[in-house]
Every structure is written in C-alpha cells, then in structure tokens.
Image (spheres, rainbow, N blue to C red):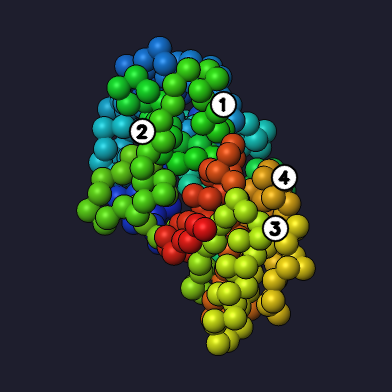
Amino acid sequence: MDESAVSNIYKAKGRANDNPLILHISNLDMLNSIAKNISDIELKLIDAFFPGPFTLILEKSNIVPNVVTANLDTVAVRMPSNIIAQKLIDYANVPIAAPSANISGRPSGTNVEDIIEELGNKVDCIINGGECNIGIESTVVKVIDGIPTILRPGKITKEDIFNVIGKVSIDSHIFEKCSLNDVVSSPGMKHKHYAPNTKCIMVYSNDNNKLVNKINTIISNTPNDVLVISTSENLNNYKSKYILDVGSKYNLDEISKNIFSILRKVDTYNVDLVILEGVSKDGIGLAIMNRLIRACEYNYIEC
C-alpha cells in the first residue's frame, strides 16, 4: 500500500513500470480489502487454489495504488502456501507486493546463493527459506466472459482448473510475442524474460529421434562451441562438448524445479549458442515450454 516502497521494487529489479505486480495475502479479509465484485467463478477458484501457486486477476478496490497495477483497474492476488511468506504477511498485517527475486529479464532466482549474487547490494534484507519446491512462478488466471483464462501457466495446470470449473482457456500471448504497445494484465507476459545473455534456440519434437537429429544438425552447423540443455534420457545422444542435465522428461516437476538454476549457469560457458530441449506441453509442461520459449526470445523449432 506504500507507493514509495513499491517503486523501490521496480528500481531494485530494473523493472518496467508497465509490468504489474502481484499482491500477496495471508487471509480472505485482506482479499476483500483490495478486490471487489468477486464473481462466483472467481470464488470457486479461490476456494480450490488458495493458498498455493495460483494468482487471480480481480477488479481492484480504490485503496490499491496504481503503481502496483501499472494503472490497470485490476489487481493480481495470490495467497502463498509457504509458511515463512504467510507469517511475514501476517506480521506486516497488510498485503505485500512482490515479484520473483531477480533482475528484470533474467531467469528467476530459486536458491539463496543466486539471489544474493544478483540482488545482495540492492535490498536491505534477504530471508533464506531454502530452495524453491516448484521452481517456476505461479499460474496467473483472469476470468474473461465467465471463462478462466490462463495468462501465465504454472504449477496449477489447465487440467486442474478445468476439473474445478468445467471450462478453461489459454491466452494466445503464452506462445506469441507481445508488442511493446500491448497492455497486459499479468506479470511476465510482455517484456524479455528468463533470458540468458547468450543466444538460445529451443527444439522440440514428440519423436525423440527427430529431436536428437535436429539438435545434432544445429550443433554440426555451428562453427563454435554449443551448450545443450538436455533431458536426462538424451545426455549421451548429443555431439557437443557442453551438456547440462535439466532432469527427466518423464518427471516434469523435476525439470520445473531445475530450469531457472540451469538457465542462470548458461552465460558462464562462454559459448556462441545454447540449444534448449523442449518438453511435452501436457500438465506443467505448458508452463515449462512457456519459460523456455521466453528464454530463447521465441527462437523456436518444432519438428
């Protein structure tokens, strides 16, 4: 609720001021203070997914500063399940505006070492709650014409939402680049995000032989060193000196937990190109693919 404090978030992260923040709450009284005209569908989503890795876009009340919402008439609200976060919000006794712990555009910090390295001289205090259990940010949903619409996929999947509401939609911007003139309702939809400095390309096929052959062709046609971010099953299939294991393609939860810490290592290899191996878009795979596509700035091949 403090405009000056919220402005310091944008300053510390180097974040564009048209990129709205999420307000984190610890109880429903806080929700009712910052949002209004909550529909029955929105109440069902709140009942099903609060607390947890789920953010809901709601009509904001007048007490929410415009700096939080990038001048929109909506506010993003989440109730975290993390006990330390809950106690911090309870102690503050006010909703807390918070983004992921990273410099804007960079892969998100998921362990305290990476966060100290990136933000240690930009913030007054860092609370070490241990390594992130999920690794990727929350699912962001806005109910549009009575249909829950996923603006940013996350751990709560389209299947989870469908099972509660019976209908769900996916915003086209999840896999399409926004223009700089677009007005967006959710964090992480518009600006460069999750991206290393090194050029990246993502390759995916549901035929593993085609996938491996395409990646090896790109490696052969690249004159200098290439780094491959590979699933565990394909580690020995690539003709590259540098390969990082992101986890098993049969355990997407493992990949979601590892992906940002892996992406943060990329620039230390000083290669000319990074090839990201894509995964199935089923379940949490949709969220992983969204992050990978953003990391490679939409430089994406499906074969």
Image height of 173 relative to 30, above or below: below
Q: Earlier in the sequence, mark 3 or mark 4?
A: 3
SS assignment at label 3: strand
* Amino acid of disc 3: Thr
SS assignment at label 2: strand
Residue 27 in view (yes/no)? no
- How far apart marks 2 and 1 lie (CA) works out to 23 Å
> Which residue corresponds to mark 2?
75
Q: Residue at x 41, y 36 (%)?
A: 170
Residue 193 placement (x, y as % from top left): 45, 58
Q: Residue at x 54, y 40 (%)?
A: 154
Q: Earlier in the sequence, mark 3 or mark 1?
A: 1
* Among the 4 quarters of the image, the one containing residue 41: top left
User: Nearer the observer, disc 2 or disc 1?
Assistant: 1
Contact check, label 4 and label 1, Cβ < 8 Å: no
Which labelled disc corresponds to residue 160?
A: 1
User: Nearer the observer, disc 4 or disc 2?
Assistant: 4
Q: Earlier in the sequence, mark 4 or mark 1?
A: 1
> Which residue corresponds to mark 3?
231
Q: Earlier in the sequence, mark 2 or mark 1?
A: 2
Which labelled disc corresponds to residue 251?
A: 4
